[in-house]
Image (spheres, grey):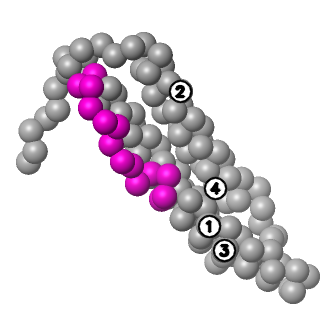
Amino acid sequence: MSPRKPPIHTVGSDPDYRFTLANERTFLAWLRTGLALLAGAVALAGLIHDFGPRALRVVITVLLLALSLVVTIGAYVRWDRAERALRENRSLPTDPLPRLIAIGIAVITAVAAALIFFAEIGG
């Protein structure tokens, strides 16, 4: 088991407040993205019942829910890592979250395109 990280306010020194606020705004933007993905999943699962094969709707819903969870958890991890780097006057760490969200949305778009295609062929 890895040792627990010390509380953020005990690490390093206070950075310029503008950087802390910018980091917070980025965190909130990632949370909005996670909420938007969740809203899409809820809408697809609860509001659209006659659009394409059910299996594809379920696949898209599950992908949206999984991506929402990854983005939401990743947002906090990203914020924490950036805040600690700012407080310790280190370079900001690289982050896989933007790549994950881009790949996830590309996959969801491809499955949604298939859903639309099958809905048009079947209807």
Residue type, mark 2 in image: Arg
Image spot of residue 26 (x, y percent): 51, 33
SS for dot 2: helix
Q: Earlier in the sequence, mark 4 or mark 3?
A: 4
Q: Residues within 10 Å of mark 4 (few under 14, many from 20)?
A: many
Residue type, mark 1 in image: Ala
Question: Residue at image x 44%, y 21%?
Answer: 19
Residue 25 circle label: 2
Q: Considering the whole magenta stretch, tell me its main secondary structure.
A: loop
Q: Is residue 79 magenta?
A: no
Q: Which residue is mark 3?
A: 111
Q: CA distance from mark 2 to mark 4?
A: 24 Å
Looking at the rendering, which quadrant does residue 2 occupy?
top left
Residue type, mark 4 in image: Ala
Q: Which residue is mark 1?
A: 106
- Vertical arrangement, residue 2 with respect to residue 122, above or below: above
* Picture quarter with the C terminus: bottom right
Label 1 vs label 3, nearer the camera: 1
Label 4 vs label 3, nearer the camera: 3
Question: Residue at image x 47%, y 16%?
Answer: 18
Residue 41 circle label: 4
